[in-house]
Image: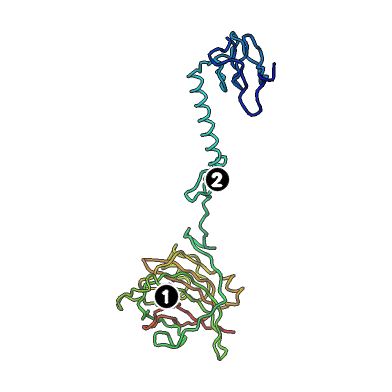
Amino acid sequence: MTSANRPQSGGAPVQPWTQGAAPSGVTCPACGLANEAGARTCRNCGLPIAAADDPVRGVAPGRVDLPRTRRSGFSATVGFVLVVALLLVGGSLAISGGGGILSGGGRLMGPAETPTPTPAPVAVGAEADTPVTVTEPHDDEVAPPATANNMKTISCENGAIKDLSRGRWFLTDVKATVREEEDGTRYDQVYWRLDRQNPNKKVKAANATTETMKCTTPDAAKEKYGDAIGRVQGDRAVEIVFDGPVKFGANTVIEQSDLEEADIGQLRRVQLFERNGKVRSVIGLKGDSCARLGSVQWTAKSKKDNARVVLDIERFD
């Protein structure tokens, strides 16, 4: 090839003929040079050039048209279905975490478990299947203020006090402890904690709660209440009744062994229960102990959300 036929640097190849006078040859698809007929490689760039009977046809500068193959519609459909199925399976496993479900808050939760029911506790020595809560004595002590609403002296006679605050109450707890006054006198004490059901509402004075104390015997108390209570221990017994808008959660028992361990020597057993729509307690006493009722936050001007009713029992130390 002469220097006149070589491609100039950076430009199109120089052809010794015009476009109309180009010999019947093959045009290079890469650089566009018209090569002589029968040429197997481009004399300009060296690219192999297909013959007329080769599969590569339709030679044009910068383009090579390959023979088209027919696509199967069935194969495309099957491939699409497989892809969708794989995406669904993968997404399901990612969400479930292998058997769980996605909770409303977006947290992964395992399969639901069936809770094991917890049997209700039963009072030790009870003669009936009445569910109870066995509670412990408490370290607190309550000193009722000297008000006209409280019993002023220890007595073995029946007595009563009234809720002058006129509340609707929920009895949340009963506890026992030892209380000591400033002069050194000690009492065994039972107290009931009350929480207001609605601090903004009061009942009529005639419907306010009255708490009564009735002195009785263990046998008489057991005969009166039967299967509603368990054994009544001790030499004497005191029956306490909340007559008014007072509700409670569950029957409760403080056992004698727990009382003795807390140095509460005059109480034998404390039972809290409900009968005929009224919350009641039966308390067994040792010896000839007498008692008195008192209260905290049952005064007419009280606006507190809670109150306590107190029973002091004399001790013989």
Image: 218 above or below 25? below
Quadrant where the N terminus sits is top right
Q: Is residue 240 left or right of residue 263?
A: left
Image: 58 above or below 259? above
Tag 1 secondary structure: loop
Residue type at mark 2? Gly
Image: 98 above or below 179? above
Quadrant where the C terminus sits is bottom right
Q: Quadrant of residue 96?
A: top right
Residue at image coords 58%, 10%: 23
Mark 1 touching mark 2, by CB under 8 A?
Answer: no
- Which mark's residue is nearer the viewer, 1 or 2? 2
Q: Position of residue 242 (x, y in %)?
A: 39, 73
> Is residue 19 or residue 63 the one in the foreground?
19
Q: Is residue 5 left or right of residue 146?
A: right
Query: Could you classify mark 2 by the number of other residues whose Cα lies within 10 Å: few (under 14), some (14-19), or many (20 or more)?
Result: some
Question: Can residue 160 be spotted in the picture?
Answer: no
How many discs mark residues in the rendered view?
A: 2
> How many angstroms separate mark 1 from mark 2 (CA)?
42 Å
Q: Quadrant of residue 268?
A: bottom right
> Is residue 160 or residue 107 the one in the foreground?
107
Q: Position of residue 217 (x, y in %)?
A: 46, 74
- From the image, tell me which residue sits under label 2: 110
Question: Can residue 31 be spotted in the picture?
Answer: yes
Tag 2 secondary structure: loop
Residue at image coords 42%, 85%: 151
- From the image, tell me which residue sits under label 1: 305
Q: Position of residue 144 (x, y in %)?
A: 47, 84
Query: Could you classify mark 1 by the number of other residues whose Cα lies within 10 Å: few (under 14), some (14-19), or many (20 or more)?
Result: some
Residue type at mark 1? Asp
Q: Position of residue 171 (x, y in %)?
A: 43, 70
Nearer the N terminus, badge 1 or badge 2?
Answer: 2
